[in-house]
Amino acid sequence: MTEVNVQRKPTAPIAGQKTGTSGLRKKVAEFSSGNYLDNWVQSLFSSLKPDLDGNTLVVGGDGRYFNDIALQHIIRLAAGNGVAKLLIGQNGILSTPAVSAIIRARSAFGGIILTASHNPGGPENDFGIKYNSANGGPAAEEITEEIFKHTESISVLNMADIPEIDLATIAASTFSVEGKEFVVEIIDSIADYEANLRNVFDFEALRNFITSRPEFKYQFDALNGVVGPYVKRMLVEGLGASASSLSNCDPLPDFGGLHPDPNLTYAAGLVEKMQSGEYSFGAAWDGDGDRNMVLGSKFFVTPSDSVAIIAASAKEAIPYFSSGITAVARSMPTSAALDRVADALGIKLYEVPTGWKYFGSIMDHYEDAKTPNVICGEESFGTGSDHIREKDGMWATLAWLSILAHENKNAAEPVSVEDIVRRHWKKFGRNYYSRHDYETVESQAANDMMAHLVSLQNGGAIVGTQLGSFTVAYADEFEYTDAFTGALAKHQGIRFGFTDGSRMVFRLSGTGSSGATIRLYLEQYVDAGGDHDKDTQEALGELIAVALETSKIEQFTGRKGPTVIT
């Protein structure tokens, strides 16, 4: 056993290290400068002490630029701060859902994930880091606040003299750090996570469907993010999908120049293939594997519809939910399509702020009550259940494949993705829904626009007035009190709801590394007997015009249109 010492290196606070909903995200140049990364990691460990001492952490990342260097720093700091063991994915690779699965499977204390999620990678782009707790989910706000407090007063880095660890070889390295054992174990990045998903889905039935129905053709695009190896192991080796159905399935530090965000704009290659009409089902995932996009032949499934359809189909199509689902939850900006399914099933629906951590306490509550089977979703291409505590892109893909297999089991003619969605609309109605993103807006301009909207609402006095042809039914700034922890989240989005069920929501996103992203959410409901065949932007046309006029977004930002429409 190699003996190593711990060096107490002096440091000083670095401004701006406040951890947000999805961790800390900055440009690589900032993360790699001076003690920027080390300060945050040391602050994390300091905030977790003394409970952290002698415990195990799971560590991995999406493979983006700086991932390998950051891992070596984390190893040395973990050893210097009393961690007993690190479980690190082979080659430093672990998807965010996989980290959650491993934490839960191995009863780890928590995990560190190196990712900026769907943000671009490379030396000129973004890097990120986040902490997940023992339940496998994102750290609660009290933890992230404690981390931030430590970043403001940090003075010492506790770094052990651990030699560089070979991340490519599955093996364990053991050291004696000032008399205490410290182990770094490189593990298979996929095995624990795959075992988890095999407990949810019937892989044998899915393999039979994929290999015995040649009329169904597939396309899978990992956008050169972390999901590539998982796709190869689970979908190709496990389910028998053709290797020719894969695109961009090799993790690359810069994602091969792609923007690893699975939407209609950034996954254009997959969209083009699916528009050809040659393929039946397509899926794409983001950089760290927690987001997904589902497509049929010439057909886009909105994330809001996706979670609603999965919830409606889960009992019959997915073995894990064979006893039924007990509750569903959605983020506030997500459409109310899920609400209608909850009403039909007679189950509880929770509306929470954006951020998967808000689903965690709901899942934990039902699990503790021995009544699990909760499904959750966000309009931002995040879908999942209580099998782990993160949104899960592969889970969503397997859920849709399970629904396809179920619907086609005894069908006289092939049932397509579009058929499934349209059947759902005929039963529940359609929520025409769209999100308009204005990215990297000057922060002050974005804040000024939001202040204008709050002022316009005038404490609810706007209720009963007209905005265009719409009558305001409610107008507020969304806040949420967690039913199980009592935690209060304020300033979670500005809402205008109308008497016909339509609504528009304005929210600033915290997932970028610079500037601000304004997200405008638009929704209009058409009942089961209504017209479900309109183009979405056309159907929402008047509501879009009202939103632009009400917010004065062009006046405040100078932007004549959104960066991305989904």
Image (cartoon, helix red, strand yellow):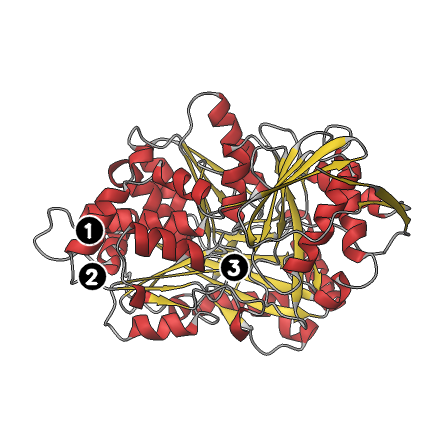
Horizontally, residue 319 falls left or right of residue 100, namely left
Asked if marks 1 and 2 touch (Cβ < 8 Å), the reply is: yes
Which label was assigned to residue 521? 3
Sequence-first disc among 3 and 1: 1
Sequence-first disc among 1 and 2: 1
Furthest residue toward front: 1
Q: Residue at x 53, y 56 (%)?
A: 288
Mark 2 element type: loop
* Crowd rating for badge 3 (residues with CA inside 10 Å; few <14, some 14–19, many 20+): many
In the rendered image, residue 298, in percent from the top left (x then y), is placed at 29, 69
Which residue occupies the foreground of this view, 323 or 171? 171
Which residue occupies the foreground of this view, 446 or 421? 421
Furthest residue toward left: 412
Which label was assigned to residue 227? none
Q: In the rendered structure, which amino acid carries the disc numbered 1?
A: Phe
Horizontally, residue 287 falls left or right of residue 385, namely right
Q: CA distance from mark 1 to mark 2?
A: 9 Å
Which residue occupies the foreground of this view, 369 or 206? 206
User: Dot 2 corresponds to which residue?
Assistant: 216
Mark 3 element type: strand
Q: In the rendered structure, which amino acid carries the disc numbered 3?
A: Tyr
User: Dot 1 corresponds to which residue?
Assistant: 209
